[in-house]
Amino acid sequence: YVHRSNCHPGPNTVQNILQQSFWIISVRGVIRRRLHRCIPCFRASPRSPQPFMGNLPRARLDHVKAFNKTGVDFAGPFNVKAALIRKLRVTKAYLCVFVCMSTTAVHLELASDLSTPTFMA
C-alpha cells in the first residue's frame, strides 16, 4: 500500500516512510521482495538486452606454448633520439606489436621502417 500510494518509490524511501510510523524487524528484505513483484515498476525499468559474445578463434582455445600463434601490428611513427658522440639525431621509428593468440601476452620490438626486410630481421 505504501509503495503504490507514494508513486512507486524505491526500497529506501518505502522503508523511511514505514519507519516514521512503525518499527518492523528485518523490514528491508520484506520490502525488497514486495517491490520485486510490483508489475508497474518492472515495466518501467526493463533490462536492456545484452549482446552475445562472438565465437573465439580456434587459436585462443587450444593450449599451446606461448607465441605459437601470433597477431602482428605496427604502431607509430615515433620520434626517437639516437645519441651520437656530440649530437642528438632524431629519427623516425615504429613499434612492432606481437600478440600471443592463446595467452594474449604482448611482445614489443622497435623497427626503423615499415619494410618487409626490417620486419623479418
Image: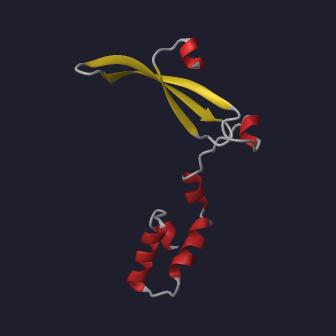
Number of callouts in the render?
0
Residue 21 is drawn in which quadrant? Answer: bottom left
Residue ID at (52%, 81%): 27
The image position of residue 118, as x and y in percent, is 54, 16
Q: Is residue 44 left or right of residue 87?
A: right
Comparing 87 with 10, the one in front is 87
Please, which residue is most extreme toward the left here? 86
Query: For the view shown, which residue lies furthest in the front direction?
Result: 85
Kindly tell me whether residue 21 is visible in this rendering.
Answer: yes
Residue 113: horizontal and vertical position, in percent? 47, 14
In percent of width and height, residue 56 lies at 72, 37
Front-most of residues 28 and 39: 28
Q: Is residue 114 above or below residue 12?
A: above
Locate residue 65 relative to residue 26 in the image: left or right.
right
Query: Does residue 55 appear in the picture of this structure?
Result: no
Q: Image point 47% across, 68% down: which residue?
A: 5
Give how far across and how far down residue 90 sits, in percent: 30, 18
Identified at 38% across, 17% down, the residue is: 92
Hey, which quadrant is residue 116 in on the image?
Answer: top right
Question: In the rendered image of this protein, does residue 108 appear above or below residue 91?
Answer: below
**Quadrant of the snapshot with the C terminus:** top right
Which residue: 57% across, 13% down? 117
- Establish if 36 lies above or below 55: below
Q: Nearer the viewer, residue 24 or 115?
A: 115
86 vs 119, nearest the viewer: 86
